[in-house]
Image: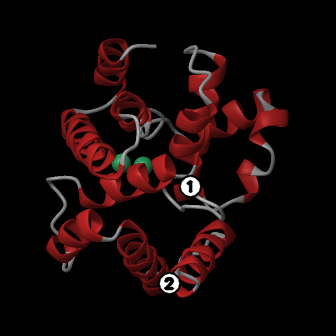
């Protein structure tokens, strides 16, 4: 799938506000890819597709997991806010001809992170958190930090979103905790 095709696809699947968010995530993902030496084309495609399942109903998401039980793994057991990334990766792989495992991984873990994140995973996670329209307290600092030290920015972003989930009384996804522990240890072991 080309970026042009991905853009058309998501334009038809998302409301205006989320489509604008998607374009902003793409812009930030490409800038981060250029800064950190990732492939800007892959970053653009992953960003364009990351929220492609966000406006599906709970029933539609569960149906996707049911129909693709092997690749969905334990998706339905994870917290519901995580589902749209997992479902988007399944749709990309099974219906839209996206076969690049790096792109699929970045889409799949964009809400939570995971243990052993690749450069592209980190870029999409951060681009989603710091896209132009985001205005939560601390976002400006994150935008600065992600161009200076991607792992430190990721660590701060994961801490903030975990806190947000906890404050809302929502279940924490174990992948987020694993991601945080992993990035903390790689920062601690820097030489
Ligand atoms: Fe998302
Ligand atoms: Fe998003």
Instruction: Give the residue at x 54% y 62%.
Output: 112
**Residue 166 bears which disc, if any?**
2
Tag 1 near tag 2, CB within 8 Å: no
Q: Residue furthest right?
A: 70
Asked if ligand 1 lies within 8 A of label 1, the reply is no
Location of residue 174 (image quadrant): bottom right
- At 85% from the left and 35% from the top, the residue drawn is 70
Quick one: 165 or 4, which is closer to the camera? 4
Residue 133, position in %: x, y?
A: 14, 54
In this picture, residue 96 sits left or right of residue 167:
right
- Residue 76 visible in the picture: yes
Pick the front one: 117 or 73 = 117
Vertical side of 16 occupied by 138: above or below: below
Circle number at residue 188 = none
Residue 133, compared with residue 16, is above or below; it is below
Please tell me which residue is depicted at 36% across the width and 59% down the height of the picture.
126
What percent of the width, then of the height, locates residue 30?
27, 40
Q: Secondary structure at mark 1?
A: helix
- Residue sitting at 77 percent across and 27 percent down? 67
Earlier sequence position, callout 1 versus callout 2: 1
Quadrant of res 2: top left
Measured as percent of width and height from the top left, residue 118 is found at 56, 52
Relative to 147, say whether 128 is above or below. Answer: above
One can see residue 110 in this view = no
Q: From mark 1 to mark 2, how far is it between C-alphas? A: 15 Å
Q: Which residue is mark 1?
A: 82
Q: In the picture provided, is 148 more to the left or to the right than 92?
A: left
């Amino acid at each position: 799938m080309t970026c042009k095709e991905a853009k058309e696809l998501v334009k038809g699947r998302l409301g205006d506000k989320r489509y604008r968010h998607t374009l902003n995530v793409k812009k930030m993902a490409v800038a981060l890819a250029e800064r950190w030496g990732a492939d800007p084309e892959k970053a653009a495609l992953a960003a364009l597709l990351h929220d492609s399942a966000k406006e599906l109903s709970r029933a539609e998401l569960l149906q996707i997991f049911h129909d693709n039980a092997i690749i969905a793994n334990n998706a339905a057991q994870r917290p519901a806010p995580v589902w749209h990334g997992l479902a988007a990766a399944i749709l990309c792989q099974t219906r839209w001809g996206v076969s690049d495992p790096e792109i699929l991984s970045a889409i799949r873990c964009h809400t939570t992170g995971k243990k052993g994140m690749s450069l592209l995973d980190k870029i999409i996670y951060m681009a989603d958190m710091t896209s132009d329209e985001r205005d939560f307290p601390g976002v400006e600092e994150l935008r600065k930090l992600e161009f200076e030290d991607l792992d430190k920015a990721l660590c701060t972003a994961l801490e903030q979103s975990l806190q947000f989930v906890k404050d809302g009384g929502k279940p924490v996804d174990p992948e987020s905790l694993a991601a945080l522990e992993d990035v903390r240890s790689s920062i601690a072991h820097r030489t």
